[in-house]
């Protein structure tokens, strides 16, 4: 039986701070020189950076790497389901278009961000990240661990791009397609969760022999990891589906004919708008050959009164 220990001592993780500070400074420079960002976008991007920092720093990093697999799975959920959509929401569309200006970058990103490629690729990478040799190797090798997290994070950006992207250079989907896409991604990890939850013995040698924290056995830790991954991912996926649904519903109320169409098709169907009428300019005359509009009843009468009794309406038929 492995001994029980407490939470590891504090570690500043200067490498994580350096990477995130570089990303923050780069975002500030880009949004002041290339594409301005709104206050809400800045809050979203900052929230994504803070979440990545929290999941990559003390104490989550030490506990997840050396003691509890459940905490390691919480890190993965942050890196794949929480932080990437916040970072994408915080990036202005013009900035994304500017980053995609090199043809090679645009070709690679647009291919990886196609819905089917992103969905299948992300879940394959997630499945590989649960292979026994990958987990045992990543928890004992810092470069491999960083590489696994980097690949997971990049594949998650591709996964969320069809749902949140507004740049014309990248693929986009209708609202109904987004909901089906998110629900499919919610069901694909079920085999991984079932394998972790139903295994009768610990799968990973590193966590089976790791010092125990809070009295959790290695098997309990593995089952808790399966439950945490399933619950957190399901909660986030259901929330995203509901947001897309209510956004579609609002558009449906405004324009039922074009609500489910992508934005660029809706704009194409609007057609050119007539030029604004100048101040003091009267209505344009009807085109040649068209009949003038019929005057309303009593249009020339003051107060809408009926014609006088001595008019044509009061004469006998024989006098007309």
Image: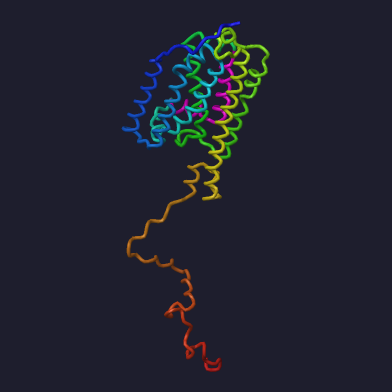
Q: Is residue 288 left or right of residue 235?
A: left
Q: Is residue 118 left or right of residue 167?
A: right
Front residue of 219 and 142: 219
Image quarter of the N terminus:
top right
Toward the left, the furthest residue is: 33
User: Could you say where residue 148 lies in the image, as x and y percent from the top left?
Assistant: 50, 16
Q: Characterize the magenta stretch by its predominant secondary structure.
A: helix
Q: Quadrant of residue 12?
A: top left
Front residue of 308 and 196: 196
Q: Is residue 14 left or right of residue 229?
A: left
Q: Residue at x 45, y 23 (%)?
A: 52
User: Could you say where residue 26 lies in the image, as x and y percent from the top left?
Assistant: 35, 26
Q: Is residue 79 left or right of residue 274?
A: right
Instruction: Please count the marks in the image.
Output: 0
Q: Residue at x 39, y 65 (%)?
A: 284
User: Could you say where residue 272 lies in the image, as x and y percent from the top left?
Assistant: 43, 52
Q: Quadrant of residue 176?
A: top right
Q: Magenta span has 130?
A: yes
Please report the bounds of the magenta region as a residue range: 105-131
Q: Residue at x 38, y 19 (%)?
A: 17
User: Could you say where residue 37 lies in the image, as x and y percent from the top left?
Assistant: 37, 35
């Amino acid at each position: 039986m492995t001994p029980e220990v407490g939470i590891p001592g504090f570690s500043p993780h200067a490498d994580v701070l350096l990477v995130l500070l570089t990303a923050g400074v780069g975002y500030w420079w880009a949004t002041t020189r290339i594409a301005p960002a709104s206050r809400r976008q800045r809050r979203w991007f900052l929230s994504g950076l803070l979440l990545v920092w929290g999941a990559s720093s003390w104490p989550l990093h030490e506990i997840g790497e050396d003691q509890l697999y459940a905490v390691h799975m919480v890190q993965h959920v942050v890196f794949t389901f929480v932080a990437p959509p916040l970072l994408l929401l915080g990036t202005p569309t013009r900035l994304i278009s500017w980053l995609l200006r090199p043809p090679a970058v645009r070709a690679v990103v647009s291919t990886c961000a196609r819905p089917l490629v992103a969905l299948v690729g992300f879940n394959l990478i997630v499945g590989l990240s649960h292979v026994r040799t990958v987990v045992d190797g990543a928890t004992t090798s810092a470069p491999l661990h960083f590489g696994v997290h980097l690949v997971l994070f990049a594949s998650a950006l591709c996964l969320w791009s069809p749902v949140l992207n507004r740049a014309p250079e990248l693929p986009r989907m209708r609202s109904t397609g987004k909901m089906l896409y998110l629900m499919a991604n919610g069901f694909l990890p079920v085999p991984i969760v079932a394998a972790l939850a139903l295994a009768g013995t610990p799968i990973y040698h590193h966590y089976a022999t790791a010092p125990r924290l809070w009295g959790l056995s290695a098997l309990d830790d593995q089952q808790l990891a399966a439950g945490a991954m399933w619950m957190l991912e399901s909660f986030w996926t259901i929330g995203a589906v509901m947001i897309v649904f209510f956004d579609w519903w609002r558009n449906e109320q405004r324009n039922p004919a074009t609500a489910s169409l992508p934005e660029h098709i809706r704009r194409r169907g609007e057609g050119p708008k007539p030029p604004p009428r100048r101040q003091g300019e009267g209505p344009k005359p009807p085109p040649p050959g068209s009949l003038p509009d019929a005057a309303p009843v009593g249009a020339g009468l003051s107060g809408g009164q009926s014609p006088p009794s001595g008019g044509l309406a009061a004469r006998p038929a024989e006098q007309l």
